[in-house]
Image (cartoon, helix red, strand yellow):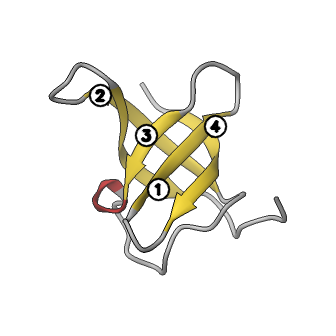
Amino acid sequence: MRFEGNIKSWEDDRGFGFIEPKHGGENVFVHVKAFTQRTGRPQIGQLVSFEVELGPRGKKRATRVEPLRRSRAP
């Protein structure tokens, strides 16, 4: 199942951040390698589409992340 949300935080030097789901709920961890397209670095406020999987420690993380449009102001 795909979800939509905005990049809420991003640590470019560490290559990860969090997505705030559009329809509420807990923020979802996202790693730079989860992006299917390498069209520049993720930006805070950027709208994305993503799927959720459980990581090795049982925590949610985004996978198959795709940007939906240009970033907006935070």
User: Picture coordinates of residue 9 (x, y %)?
Assistant: 61, 53
Q: In 3D space, how far apart are the residues under numbered discs 2 and 1 (Cα atoms)? A: 15 Å
Q: Earlier in the sequence, mark 2 or mark 3?
A: 3
**Residue identifier under label 1:** 66
Residue at 61% x, 52% y: name it: 7
Please state which amino acid type lies under the numbered disc 1.
Glu
The image shows residue 65, relative to residue 73, as above or below, that is: above
Nearer to us in this view, 65 or 20: 20
Decide if residue 4 is on the left or right side of residue 62.
right
Question: Mark 1: which secondary structure?
Answer: strand
Is disc 1 surrounded by few (<14), some (14 to 19) or many (20+) residues within 10 Å?
some
Q: Residues within 10 Å of mark 3 (few under 14, many from 20)?
A: many
Q: Any mark on residue 55, and which?
A: none
Residue tagged 3: 29
What whole-number distance in Å separates the C-alpha atoms at marks 1 and 3?
Answer: 15 Å
**N-terminal label among 4 and 3:** 4
